[in-house]
Image (cartoon, rainbow, N blue to C red):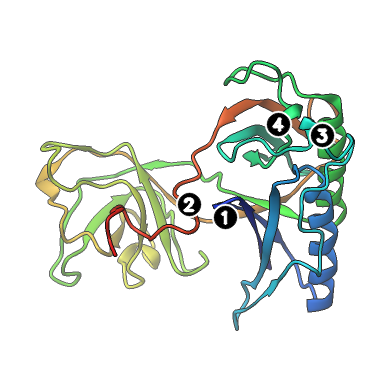
């Protein structure tokens, strides 16, 4: 399994897009398919948008990674349907993006924001409901999706159903600083890929100023629920020492955080192209790539 991350830059702003290559690919194959995809993706970008780097990470053990740099692939935006000086060639501001729904061959869906699009390809009135996209942009997107599908690129998804707790949260001297959650279903077992992760939602607090439960946690591998033969299946969560069981007003749901992968389709969806444009929208890109990390703007 390879994780492929495209790094984009437009003036001083940057963003990324991530794709996956399930299966065993040799290094030369990875370079070939990434180069092909970069060419198709650059064709969707205006002149001021660059693919500044492509990071390829082998998620199998031992973990290996390498970068592809401009010169080994098409870097600058190549949307060339108009004369070079046409306003339609210029990239829209980095915060403008198309929200697109992609379809997988196994029926999963993936919603993404694509930035770097030529400004002239948006409708005359830019807004959340604007889907007035030039047909030439659809041509570029269709070619891009065909490159995704043809080279076997996938997107990641989670679809595990949430399970309610079978009791109240607890603590144990055997697991200091960890909250235990009992479930009536064994949501994590010895066959679940490690590290064991659990996703929680729907929990409510008595005192909103204190810490609560919600989000992704690592499950202690010694939790009895992993090997238990009967319910309740109790899982202890690491890094929950600041959560008081008495402050949990309402328990929610939990599910094992296990990812699946679906190959991008080039013919599913209402238009038979593998994608649907949901509209144009604003997408925050954060601070400039040249700014210091962190919240403070006054650090030396």
Q: Residue at x 72, y 53 (%)?
A: 154
- Dot 1 lies on which element? loop
Work out how far the residue at label 4 is from the one at label 2, CA to CA, in angstroms.
20 Å
CB-based contact (under 8 Å), mark 2 and mark 1:
no
Labels 4, 3: front one: 4
Q: Residues within 10 Å of mark 2 (few under 14, many from 20)?
A: some
Q: Residue at x 62, y 53 (%)?
A: 9
Residue 96, can we see it? yes
Question: In the figure, is residue 283 to the left or right of 294?
Answer: right
| Residue with the mark numbered 3 | 268
In the rendered structure, which disc, 4 or 2, sits on the residue that comes first in sequence?
A: 4
Q: Residue at x 81, y 59 (%)?
A: 74
The quadrant of the picture occupied by the N terminus is bottom right
CB-based contact (under 8 Å), mark 4 and mark 2:
no
Q: Nearer the viewer, residue 75 or 67?
A: 75
| Residue with the mark numbered 2 | 288
Q: Which mark is residue 119?
A: 4
In the rendered structure, which disc, 1 or 4, sits on the residue that comes first in sequence?
A: 4
């Amino acid at each position: 399994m390879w994780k492929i991350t495209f790094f984009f830059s437009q003036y001083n702003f940057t963003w990324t897009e991530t794709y996956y290559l399930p299966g065993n690919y040799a290094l030369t194959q990875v370079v070939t398919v990434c180069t092909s995809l970069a060419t198709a993706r650059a064709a969707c970008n205006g002149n001021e948008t660059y693919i500044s780097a492509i990071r390829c990470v082998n998620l199998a053990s031992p973990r290996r990674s390498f970068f592809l740099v401009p010169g080994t692939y098409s870097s600058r935006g190549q949307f060339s349907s108009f004369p070079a000086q046409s306003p339609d060639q210029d990239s829209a501001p980095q915060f403008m993006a198309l929200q697109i729904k992609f379809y997988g061959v196994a029926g999963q869906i993936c919603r993404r924001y694509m930035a770097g699009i030529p400004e002239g390809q948006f409708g005359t009135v830019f807004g959340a409901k604007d889907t007035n996209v030039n047909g030439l942009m659809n041509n570029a997107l269709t070619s891009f999706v065909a490159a995704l599908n043809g080279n076997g690129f996938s997107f990641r998804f989670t679809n595990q159903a949430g399970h309610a707790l079978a009791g109240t949260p607890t603590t144990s001297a055997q697991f200091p600083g960890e909250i235990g959650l009992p479930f009536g279903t064994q949501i994590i077992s010895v066959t679940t890929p490690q590290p064991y992760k659990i996703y929680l939602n729907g929990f409510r607090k008595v005192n909103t100023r204190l810490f609560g439960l919600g989000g992704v946690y690592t499950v202690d591998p010694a939790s009895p629920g992993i090997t238990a033969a009967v319910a309740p299946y109790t899982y202890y969560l690491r890094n929950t020492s600041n959560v008081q069981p008495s402050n949990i007003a309402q328990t929610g749901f939990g599910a094992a955080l296990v990812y699946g992968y679906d190959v991008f389709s080039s013919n599913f969806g209402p238009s038979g192209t593998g994608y649907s444009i949901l509209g144009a929208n604003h997408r925050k890109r954060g601070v400039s790539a040249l700014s210091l990390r962190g919240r403070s703007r006054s650090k030396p």
